[in-house]
Image (cartoon, rainbow, N blue to C red):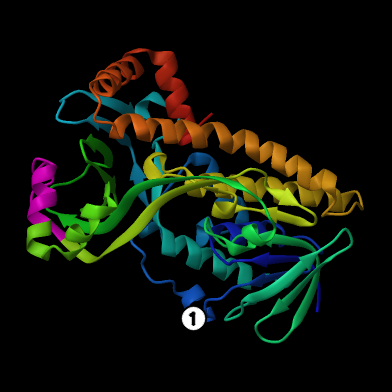
């Protein structure tokens, strides 16, 4: 089987990338280990995606946004960052922007379902479900993949979109900067009897971080970041005890809180590939950059990178050039590295600062929050980065 592009992984980044090329003459294969049933109806994994205005625009242009049920989309109109037990907070309000909201909160599985539905409508894209790549080779002329269904696939360009722990990246010999935070992120959905008023909280308590992300109705996504040693006790906690514990940690500002569904645990490991391309090969999504979730920018960066690469491929195609040339892939690497590297390292530094128990770090945290809140140029820069309204 001969294709122009082969993509490993049918996650949001991989599907968004191929959907961006659905209006071209390119023949594209997406290879995914999960079944078509799971792809069309992904189970709830507890993760809510905070989308920036730029990401929403990309999804609108791809036709994905229109497929998402608007009743499950929540607006984030305000956000507060709290440090320990201090009553002082760094406050962001949509009224300080040109938009009516800071961002949008959408369940991860619903984005995946919408993206898959759109891709399935495209005649030039074939999704091969229940299939894994057993081996592959790349050279200056082509890519060859041996699949688990005993078929061989030839392509001009191979894209790895199979997550931050991708084996494809390792097989290509691309080194990474990896940071294991030694922590686990526990996410769940909770119902409460007091409204959240579309206000998101990020509370940096000593030993743990708590976040509340406003969902549609009187529901919120609760995100607990804690040392992996202590995470298991929270996962095993009785539901009633868990409800009371979370409600009290937020000083009952949401009233009674009740767990809806399961708690999900994810180890916190950040990854940044040293470079995003090789011979007829490129990394996108978490395979290129896997962020700490504190700034909620992982998905947004993945979407932006996929769009950059798709645009470069379209440009090469319009000029009858090789879509997998060194020049095309080098441009992608340079552009996406500029987008991701400063944010990756800045996020990791911020996480280290707010998790440190040192006296100097505590003083610096208080100073940073006050400075950021009161010095408007800095606050505007932070807000523009977080919301992408500029």
* Quadrant location, the N terminus: bottom right
- Tell me if residue 186 can be seen: yes
Query: From where the camera sits, is residue 68 visible?
Result: no
Q: Position of residue 244 (x, y in %)?
A: 7, 54
Q: Is residue 152 left or right of residue 85?
A: right
Q: Which residue is farthest bottom? A: 150
Image location (x, y in percent) of residue 81: 28, 31
Q: How many marks?
A: 1
Considering the numbered disc 1 on the image, is that residue within a helix, a strand or a loop? helix
- Residue 331, percent across and down? 76, 40
* Vertical placement of residue 298 versus 189, above or below: above
Of residue 74 and residue 247, the one placed in the foreground of this image is 247
User: Which residue is more in the foreground, 312 or 345?
Assistant: 345
- Residue designated by label 1: 37
Asked if 259 appears above or below 83 in the picture, the reply is below
Q: Is residue 249 magenta?
A: yes
Q: Check the image and report above or below for 380 versus 192.
A: above
> Residue drawn at (61%, 55%), measured in percent from left and top?
62
- Picture layout, residue 350 above or below residue 65: above
Tell whether 381 sits left or right of 86. Answer: right
Left or right, 224 with reference to 133? left
Which of the 4 image quarters holds residue 186?
bottom left
Identity of the residue drawn at 21% across and 62% down: 235
Q: Specify the quadrant of the image occupied by residue 375.
A: top left
Q: Quadrant of residue 6?
A: bottom right
Identify the residue at image location x=57%, y=62%: 162
Direction top: furthest residue: 375
Crowdedness of circle 1 by 10 Å Cα count: few (<14), some, many (20+)? Answer: few
Residue drawn 17% across the image and 65% down it: 236
- The part of the chain drawn in magenta is 243-258
User: Residue 261, percent across and down?
Assistant: 23, 67
């Amino acid at each position: 089987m001969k294709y122009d592009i082969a993509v490993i992984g049918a996650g949001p980044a991989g599907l968004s990338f191929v959907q961006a090329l659905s209006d071209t003459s390119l023949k594209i294969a997406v290879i995914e280990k999960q079944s078509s049933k799971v792809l069309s109806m992904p189970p709830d994994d507890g993760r809510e995606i905070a989308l920036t205005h730029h990401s929403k625009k990309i999804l609108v242009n791809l036709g994905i946004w229109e497929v998402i049920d608007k009743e499950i989309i929540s607006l984030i109109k305000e956000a507060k960052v709290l440090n320990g037990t201090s009553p002082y907070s760094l406050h962001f309000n949509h009224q300080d922007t040109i938009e009516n909201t800071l961002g949008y909160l959408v369940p991860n599985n619903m984005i995946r379902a919408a993206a898959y539905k759109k891709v399935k409508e495209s005649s030039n894209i074939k999704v091969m479900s229940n299939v894994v790549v057993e081996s592959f080779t790349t050279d200056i002329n082509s890519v060859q993949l041996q699949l688990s269904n005993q078929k061989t696939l030839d392509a001009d360009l191979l894209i790895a979109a199979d997550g931050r722990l991708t084996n494809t990246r390792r097989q290509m010999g691309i080194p990474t900067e990896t940071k294991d935070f030694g922590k686990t992120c526990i996410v769940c959905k909770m119902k409460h009897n007091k409204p959240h008023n579309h206000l998101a909280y990020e509370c940096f308590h000593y030993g743990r971080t708590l976040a509340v992300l406003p969902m549609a109705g009187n529901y919120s996504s609760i995100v607990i970041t804690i040392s992996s040693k202590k995470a298991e006790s929270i996962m095993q906690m009785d539901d009633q005890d868990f409800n009371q514990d979370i409600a009290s940690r937020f000083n009952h500002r949401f009233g009674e809180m009740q767990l809806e569904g399961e708690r999900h645990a994810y180890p916190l490991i950040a990854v940044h590939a040293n470079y995003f391309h090789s011979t007829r090969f490129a990394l996108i999504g978490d395979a290129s950059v896997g962020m700490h979730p504190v700034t909620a920018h992982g998905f947004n960066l993945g979407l932006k990178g996929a769009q950059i690469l798709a645009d470069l491929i379209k440009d090469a195609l319009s000029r009858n050039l090789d879509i997998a040339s060194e020049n095309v892939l080098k441009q992608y690497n340079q552009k996406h590295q500029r987008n991701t590297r400063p944010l990756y390292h800045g996020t990791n530094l911020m996480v280290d600062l707010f998790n440190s128990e040192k006296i100097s770090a505590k003083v610096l945290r208080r100073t940073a929050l006050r400075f950021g809140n009161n010095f408007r140029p800095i606050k505007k820069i932070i807000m523009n980065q977080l919301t992408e309204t500029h």
